[in-house]
Image: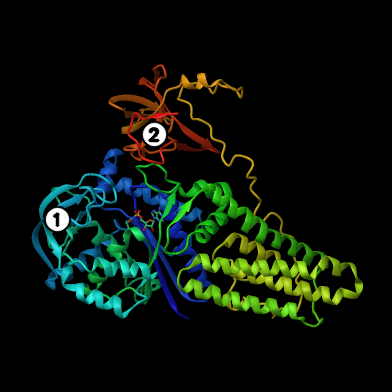
Amino acid sequence: MSTFYLTTPIYYVNARPHLGHACTTIMADAMCRYRRLAGDRVYLLTGTDEHGERIAQVAAAAGKSPQAYADEIAAVFQETWRRLGITNDDFIRTTEPRHRKVVQEVLQRLHDAGEIYFGEYGGWYCYGCERFYTEKEIVDGKCPDHQTALTFVKEKNYFFKMSKYQAWLIKHLEDNPGFIQPDRYRNEVLGFLREPLQDLSISRPRSRVEWGIPLPFDDQYVTYVWFDALLNYYSAVSDPENPKTHGLWEHVEHLIGKDILKPHGVYWPTMLKAAGIPLYRRLNVHGYWSLGGSKMSKSVGNVVEAFQLTDKYGHDAFRYFLLREMNFGLDANFSEEAFVDRLNADLANDLGNLASRATTLIAAAGAVMQVIAPIEPGDREMYMAAAETKSLVGHAMGEFAFQKALAELWSFIGAVNRYVDTNAPWALAKDPAKRRRLERVLCTLADSLGFLGIMLDPFLPDAARKIRLALGQSAPPTLEAAVVGRLTSVPRATKISGLFPRVDTKAAPTTLSLQRGPGEGAGGDAGKIPITDFQKVELRVAEVLAAERVPKSKKLLKLSIRVGEETRTLVAGVAEHYEPGDLVGRKVVIVANLQPATLMGVESNGMVLAAEHGGTLSLITLDRDLPSGAKVK
Ligand code: MSP
């Protein structure tokens, strides 16, 4: 039995869980489920990154203490993973004492060993990224990530002597080709290392940033958020009192998105080396999802919340799409059309139809204790196809290539569907002389479906369980049992129907209804209007400058918005769906020429547009950034 300890990034608590976070967490979950199926000792860690000035700012904007704010969003992450069926063994928060203790111990150890010194550094700083940028990285004088102006910051700080590990790290990467995978990311890290490596500033003065772990050797400073965050992977398994985590560390592998390659590929191994902690086994890096071709980002407002699609189409379909559509390591584009296409073709058609026709045929024949008909070449081909699929899936999973694993499984599903077509059990059933052959065919079919009930488990846990239950298998699945050719009976089966219902693509995928301003009647009818009526409505882009709850109202938020040069106040009925802090800095679409209305004593000048479906509200935002005041037509 081997041990496998896998981590996801710990997510910042300044945003709610979205498709990107869900993707990494689902990949990690699928991998861990696979390794558990293989009989390994598995430990999955996820959590939240809660310190730093960005979090403090967002909390302040929401009128909360950073801790209260972090508690709230951390709970949303936990609840999201629970609802998505994520099988994490632990959830670490960087504000927990168990984490703080380890961070301080490691800092003290590095300080005592002379790995940390006090110095002054001046450079271009991005408050959004909470890091300095080198001249080379700066694009048009701006942060390459946020496209916002950088600030020249000069301050005294503590530095970790990272530069002294440059040659060692290059050698380590060269000697261990699999240390960072896929290869393109190992090459990218080697690329960073062609430039001289700077020392890493690991503190922030308390006068500027309060919200962090105090340095154990100087309480005028708090720990730099990345130095604090990376150590979560280690602190979570370092409690000597917790036997569940003993012996895990030396097996740790990380799974991250490509955006955080540098801290994980450069800072983290050098930190571990300096602290005398064994290095991680492997860093696995996936690409980025974009939406309509542009990066998913809060400021652009094209964020897909984790639940939008699972609520609509189910967990398994959501998992399947994320795992199947992204080639591990490369970027992928998300669209609801592509999602529905895959759902209909792969899940409803290929797998759903197979499960329903196979169980119908098996159930109709009734159980057969002992199948005695000879095995024909067509049966043997299925045995071999299953063995080959299992080995290819194993190989793909070894490199986190979920898309390959699923493609292999779907090619097996295709083979089983063809086996059914070729052997036409419905025709065999009509001829009593062919009863024995029918039993053999149904035995192979039940065996193949049972194989899928195990092999699909990491990817489609709900559907796989339904398949196993339909075949009367209630024991926990194991990879060892995933063999076609051993079964000598036809099980008593129950019919499966509608495993994945088809989605009607002719019907509009979502019924968008415009959110009316509070206080207005629902009004309106389905009658058509001339375009000139529509043109009377002035729709514009507005930027939310500030947001607060309207006292004594559950539903209303008071927004201060900018429309071009003008600033105005508007009341929106969105308080049950958005926190005030979620809205600040976002661009929304408003009806700009509504007559003012007073709501709960606040005068509202305009109305924010939102879509609503099944109780979920989604603000209409822009998928490309445009200045506030821009006309919407
Ligand atoms: N807190 C840091 C990580 C510290 S780990 C010691 C952080 N947090 S984050 O909330 O911004 O999460 C970043 C991670 O979320 C990415 O590395 C990736 O795993 C996931 N993703 C966020 N957006 C994503 C996409 N658009 N596409 C794919 N994954 C994305 O960085």
Q: Residues within 10 Å of mark 1 (few under 14, many from 20)?
A: many
Give the residue at mark 2: 588
Q: Amino acid at mark 2?
A: Val
Q: Quadrant of residue 355?
A: bottom right
Q: Which mark is residue 221?
A: 1
Beta carbon at label 1 within 8 Å of ligand 1: no
Q: Quadrant of residue 202?
A: bottom left
Q: Is residue 171 above or below residue 159?
A: below
Question: Which quarter of the rendering shows the C terminus?
Answer: top left
Would residue 370 be found to the left or right of residue 245 on screen? right
**Is residue 472 shown to the viewer in this render?**
no
| Label whose residue precedes the other's in the sequence (1 or 2) | 1
Would residue 570 be found to the left or right of residue 609 on screen? left
Q: Residue at position x 42%, y 23% from top?
A: 538
Tell me the CA gap for discs 1 and 2: 39 Å
Q: Is residue 117 above or below residue 616?
A: below
Q: Residue at position x 81%, y 82% from top?
A: 372
Q: Quadrant of residue 607?
A: top left
Image position, residue 346 (x, y; %): 62, 58
Give SS at disc 2: strand
